[in-house]
Amino acid sequence: MARHCETNRSSAFAYFFFDGRDGQKESQTVGSLVRSLIAQFTATYGGIPATLAKLYQSCHDGRSQPSVQSLQSVLLTILESFDNVYIVLDALDECTERKDILKWIKEMTSWRKDKLHLLATSRPEEDIAKHLRLLDSDHVYIKQGLITRDVKRYVDHILNGDDGFDRWNNEIKANIKSKLLDSAGGMFVLF
């Protein structure tokens, strides 16, 4: 799971990827998202926030797990210390808790519209698209043809430019390319 957070005086940035690959179930939940965001924003907070330390103590010094609601409360307290918060949620459609993530996004976007800047990407799943359109009309649908063209160029570059693929014949390379292009799909992006 890729994560990155940085600060620029009064702004903080975080990224979360809902990794849908086999064996990555722990990175497909709302709880893992909130934990990751807490970790990323705490790194730029300038120490351990008192609310996080209190939550840790209330969970028997980490021997029990806090609820997602408790973690959400801590996250919002941490975010209050920044003037602007930028969060990128990648592959929203890979979240195993679809209703919960859509509810979480709704709660977050109602928190402080002037402070929170959210970018979410997803394949064009109707429930996600419908929900996000209701929250914000500033969305972009990236047509599948554009994505397919970019994926094709990238895959060609890797398959033909990396010496590790030289031992594979053209039929195998074509099969790999076909499978990747079939799964690229379209994408929905919320600003």
Image (cartoon, grey):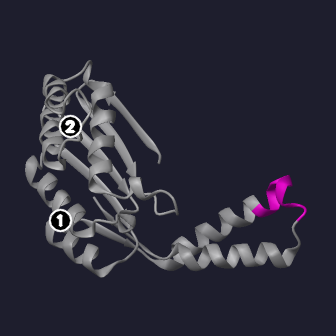
Q: Residue at x 81, y 56 (%)?
A: 161
Secondary structure beneath disc 1? loop
Q: Is residue 8 visible?
A: no
Q: Residue at x 13, y 30 (%)?
A: 58
Mark 2 and mark 1: span between their CA atoms? 18 Å
- Residue that carries the numbered disc 2 in the rendered image: 84
Q: Is residue 64 visible?
A: yes
Residue 117 is inside the magenta segment: no
Residue 170 vs residue 49, the one in the foreground = 49
- Residues in magenta, as a range: 159-167
**Does residue 143 appear to the left or right of 182 in the view shown?**
left
Badge 2 local density, few (<14 within 10 Å), some, or many (20+)? Answer: many
Residue 58 vs residue 104, the one in the foreground = 58
- Residue that carries the numbered disc 1 in the rendered image: 136
Q: Amino acid at mark 2?
A: Asn
Q: Quadrant of the C terminus?
A: bottom left
Quarter occupied by residue 12:
top left
**Residue 181: x percent and y percent?**
61, 76
Q: Residue at x 17, y 65 (%)?
A: 136
**Residue 8: x percent and y percent?**
31, 27
**Does residue 86 appear to the left or right of 3 in the view shown?**
left
Quarter occupied by residue 18:
bottom left
Secondary structure beneath disc 2? strand
Lower sequence index among marks 2 and 1: 2
Quarter occupied by residue 78:
top left
**Residue 139: x percent and y percent?**
28, 67
Q: Is residue 123 above or below residue 111?
A: below
